[in-house]
Image (spheres, rainbow, N blue to C red):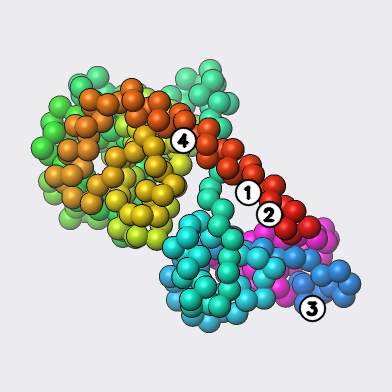
């Protein structure tokens, strides 16, 4: 289907997300086997899995070397590709979303109801992946019964052993429709998103910026470099998570204002990068 689409549309620039590597592979097949004149430029948006997964040692490496450009999300991933692949990708972080249409919607059906029992509400963004320190979050919650933790994500992926100590102030929301998910994140007092991967930039942190919400996240250089305002960093331990929440309780207004400033800065920087890269690939 992809090959048929490319042959019909005949684009001059093709942007492929990787993984799956099959997308950029088919684009390369189209470029070299089905185009004779003015072959298209292929740009690969390389996510972490394209670099750390098993494909990164063979097919992925070969395809990236033949691409017109490769996009990564931070300097750590750029350095990795320079060292292991012999290519120099460009750095482009995620764009900051505009949630105005969702937050101004009158569709009450998609609203999320926050429990009124807690004195403070924490949104924990999760997909229950292996790089998320979920047990540390649950342990922190057990020590803060007056604080309510809303952990997002499809519950079928939860490690059942991690829920043995789950307390009543921890609410597993299950998978939410996106509008409902955004509504939850804008109603809580702080957003948390963690990773044990030092090279990642976590998507939930961008949503905190978009919603101008205080953020608690992992203490990695790649994260601290981009989210340098409105953010508290931790070493993914329950004690530090608890202390970070207590700090946000006393500085919520200040952190929200910092996040507002960060949002403006990052949106302007992204627009400039897009303009520069557009000129580069034309």
Q: Residue 10, how many percent across, how many down? A: 83, 61
Residue placed at 79% from the left, 66% from the top?
A: 40
* 88 lies above or below 187: below
Q: Is residue 6 inside the magenta stretch?
A: yes
Earlier-in-chain disc, 4 versus 3: 3
Give the magenta part as a residue range: 3-29
Earlier-in-chain disc, 3 versus 2: 3
Residue underneath mark 1: 273
CA gap between label 1 and label 2 equals: 6 Å
Mark 3 or 2: in front is 2
Q: Secondary structure at mark 3?
A: helix
CA gap between label 4 and label 1 equals: 16 Å
Q: Nearer the viewer, residue 200 or 187?
A: 200
CA gap between label 4 and label 2 equals: 22 Å
Earlier-in-chain disc, 4 versus 1: 4
CA gap between label 4 and label 3 equals: 46 Å
Residue underneath mark 2: 277
Mark 3 or 1: in front is 1
Q: Nearer the viewer, residue 124 or 109?
A: 124
Q: Marks 1 and 2: CB-CB under 8 Å?
A: yes
Residue underneath mark 4: 262
Please tell me how crowded label 4 is: few (under 14), some (14-19), or many (20+) other residues with Cα within 10 Å: many
């Amino acid at each position: 289907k992809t090959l048929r689409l490319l042959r019909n549309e005949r684009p001059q620039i093709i942007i492929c997300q990787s993984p799956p590597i099959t997308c950029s592979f088919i684009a390369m097949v189209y470029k070299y086997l089905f185009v004779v004149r003015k072959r298209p430029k292929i740009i690969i948006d390389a996510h972490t899995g394209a670099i750390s997964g098993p494909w990164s040692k063979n097919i992925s490496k070969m395809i990236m070397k033949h691409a017109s450009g490769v996009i990564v999300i931070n300097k750590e991933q750029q350095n990795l590709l320079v060292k292991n692949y012999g290519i120099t990708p460009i750095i482009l972080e995620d764009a900051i979303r505009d949630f105005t249409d969702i937050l101004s919607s009158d569709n009450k059906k998609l609203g999320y109801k926050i429990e009124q029992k807690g004195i403070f509400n924490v949104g924990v963004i999760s997909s229950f992946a292996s790089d998320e320190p979920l047990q540390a979050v649950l342990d922190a919650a057990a020590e803060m019964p007056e604080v309510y933790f809303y952990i997002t994500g499809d519950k079928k992926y939860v490690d059942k052993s991690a829920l043995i100590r789950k307390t009543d102030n921890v609410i597993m929301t299950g998978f939410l429709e996106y509008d409902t998910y955004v509504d939850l994140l804008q109603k809580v007092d702080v957003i948390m998103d963690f990773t044990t991967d030092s090279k990642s930039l976590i998507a939930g942190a961008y949503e905190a910026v978009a919603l101008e919400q205080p953020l608690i996240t992992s203490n990695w250089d790649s994260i601290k470099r981009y989210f340098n305002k409105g953010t508290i960093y931790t070493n993914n331990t329950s004690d530090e998570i608890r202390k970070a929440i207590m700090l946000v309780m006393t500085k919520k207004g200040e952190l929200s204002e910092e996040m507002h400033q960060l949002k403006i800065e990052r949106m302007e920087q992204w627009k400039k990068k897009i303009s520069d890269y557009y000129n580069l690939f034309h």
